[in-house]
Amino acid sequence: MIYKRRQGFTLVEMLITVVLVFLLFAVMYATFFSVSNTTQKIQQRMKSSEIMFRFVNKFSGEVKSMIREKNDETSFDLKEISFITTTGETAYPVKITYTVNKTTENAEKLLRKQENLISDYSFTFPVMDEYDSISFLFFSDGVWQEYADSPESIKAVGIEIIRGTEKYFFPAVIYGAVIDEKGK
């Protein structure tokens, strides 16, 4: 008996090929979306870090140019700091208040309020949000403290930021002499 050679593929060969191609695409699909999700998380983390470091740079500049007066305009507390400063952005002194508030998710956010002392115009905006903890610390008498009674004793102001397992501490040295309006 003479067998003729058949042209084409058998059904079993076609099914094996389809299954192999399907498995290849499934692996590629999972890899692509895994890489895509990881890239998105990294970009979000980089954006958050950039916002934090821009804030810290601005905060440091404001603290360095702080006008330290003995009056009711300044306060230094663990969750709020208020002081008068002159930065390069304004030709006149402004009062800056940073306040830490709790959000509904039990996270903390930092608000910045700037008041024009000449025109009484003020505005408030969020600086950072969704952090586990944001606290101010004050360097006085050789020790970092959570509260300061008087601005003349403070040599530096630090901000401690905690998010997840990451903990950051950024100190800023205060320049300038203390001004005593009562002693003039």
Image: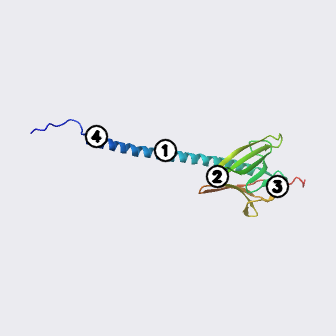
Q: Position of residue 153 (x, y in %)?
A: 79, 60
**Residue corresponding to mark 1:** 36
The label number, if any, that marks residue 14 in the structure image: 4
- The residue wearing badge 3 is 178
For mark 3, does the 10 Å Cα neighbourhood hold few (<14), some (14 to 19), or many (20 or more) residues?
some
Q: Is residue 104 above or below residue 7?
A: below
Q: Are marks 2 and 1 in contact (CB under 8 Å)?
A: no
Circle 3 SS class: strand
Residue 63 picture location, percent across and down? 74, 51
Marks 3 and 4, how far apart at CA: 86 Å
**Secondary element type, mark 4:** helix
The answer to which of marks 4 and 2 sits earlier in the sequence is 4
Percent across and percent down for residue 173 are 72, 55
Tell us which disc is closer to us: 4 or 1. Answer: 4
Sequence-first tag of 3 and 4: 4
Which label number is shown at residue 131?
2
Q: Comparing marks 3 and 4, which lies closer to the viewer?
A: 4
Give the CA distance from mark 3 to mark 2. 33 Å
Q: Amino acid at mark 2?
A: Tyr
**Image location of residue 17, percent across then percent down:** 30, 42
